[in-house]
Amino acid sequence: MGKKLKEFDVVFESGEDGYVAAFVPALPGCHTQGRTIAEAVRNVKEAISLYLEVASESRARSKSKFMGIRRIGVPLPA
């Protein structure tokens, strides 16, 4: 039986330096680049795997428990 897959949206942008930047909106700080789109795809797959591995290890060590999410409004300056 194959490995389970989790899919993520990835944003690709061309940089002024000719590189292709890739970032994963669902994983803050998870970003990479490549000389080509194919290289950026390979690199972002590796970056996602490493991100999830580190996050899993952090959760295992953490004593905190998830309590919930709440949307909070803040007035904008005039």
Image (tube, helix red, strand yellow):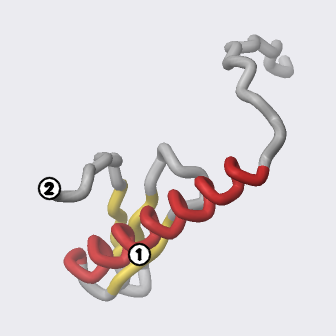
Is 14 positioned to the left or the right of 71 in the image? left
Q: Amino acid at mark 2?
A: Met
Camera-nearest residue between 78 and 4: 4
Number of numbered discs overlaid on the protein picture: 2
Residue located at (29% from left, 47% from top):
7
Disc assigned to residue 1: 2
Q: Residues within 10 Å of mark 1 (few under 14, many from 20)?
A: few
Residue located at (45% from left, 60% from top):
23
Is 45 positioned to the left or the right of 24 in the image? left
Disc assigned to residue 15: 1
Which quadrant of the view contains residue 2? bottom left
Specify the quadrant that holds the C terminus. Answer: top right
Residue 43 in the image: above or below residue 75: below
**Image coordinates for residue 11, horizontal then vertical, percent:** 36, 55
Camera-nearest residue between 58 and 21: 58
**Image coordinates for residue 8, horizontal then vertical, percent:** 34, 48
Q: Secondary structure at mark 2?
A: loop
Specify the quadrant that holds the N terminus. Answer: bottom left
**Image coordinates for residue 21, horizontal then vertical, percent:** 41, 71
Q: Amino acid at mark 1?
A: Gly
Which quadrant of the view contains residue 77? top right
Camera-nearest residue between 51 and 75: 51
Residue located at (31% from left, 87% from top):
35
Camera-nearest residue between 44 and 62: 62
- Give the residue at the far left of this rendering: 1
Is 60 positioned to the left or the right of 16 in the image? right
Residue located at (50% from left, 66% from top):
31
- Tell which tag, 1 or 2, sits nearer the viewer: 2
Is tag 1's residue or tag 2's residue first in the polypeptide sequence?
2
